């Protein structure tokens, strides 16, 4: 399942909610050119932590995240 900018996803292992900042159609991993997503904790859950994470699209879409 492809995610879009502003989609909120639930990380199944931690229960945390993350917001997509850049979708895989515009984001790539530098080393491989593999499609990726940029995301961060959702505003309501961030507690002031606005770290941006980047993860390969294949990992984001393999079931560890779900719409949330």
Image (cartoon, rainbow, N blue to C red):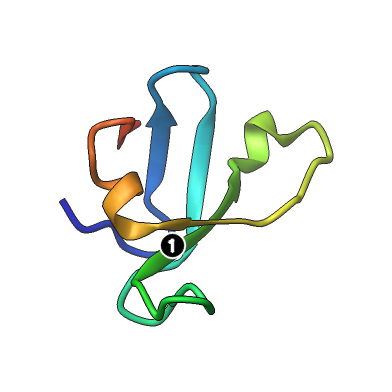
The answer to whether 51 is drawn above or below residue 47 in the figure is below
Q: Residue at x 33, y 30 (%)?
A: 64
Front-most of 40 and 28? 28
Q: Quadrant of residue 57?
A: bottom left
Q: How many marks?
A: 1
Left or right: residue 46 versus residue 23 is right
The answer to whether 17 is drawn above or below residue 53 in the figure is above
The answer to whether 1 is drawn above or below residue 13 in the figure is below
Q: Residue at x 72, y 35 (%)?
A: 46
Front-most of 37 and 31? 31
Q: Residue at x 40, y 58 (%)?
A: 56
Front-most of 35 and 5? 35
Q: Quadrant of residue 32?
A: bottom left
In the rendering, at what x and y percent does residue 24 appear? 34, 70
Q: Residue at x 84, y 40 (%)?
A: 48
The answer to whether 10 is drawn above or below residue 18 in the figure is above
Front-most of 54 and 68? 54
* Residue occupying the far front of the picture: 31
**Where is the C terminus found, in terms of image quarters?**
top left
Characterize the local packing of mark 1: few (<14), some (14-19) or many (20 or more) Cα atoms within 10 angstroms.
Answer: many
Left or right: residue 10 versus residue 31 is left
Left or right: residue 38 versus residue 67 is right
Q: Quadrant of residue 26?
A: bottom left
In the rendering, at what x and y percent does residue 3 appear? 28, 57
* Residue occupying the far right of the picture: 48
User: Circle 1 sits in a helix, a strand or a loop, which is it?
Assistant: strand
In the rendering, at what x and y percent does residue 6 appear? 43, 58
- Which residue in the protein does label 1 denote? 37
């Amino acid at each position: 399942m492809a995610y879009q900018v502003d989609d909120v996803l639930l990380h199944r292992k931690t229960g945390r909610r993350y917001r997509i900042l850049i979708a895989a159609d515009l984001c790539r991993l530098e080393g491989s050119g593999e499609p990726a997503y940029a995301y961060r904790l959702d505003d309501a859950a961030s507690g002031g932590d606005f770290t941006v994470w980047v993860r390969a699209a294949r990992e984001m879409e393999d079931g560890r995240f779900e719409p949330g």
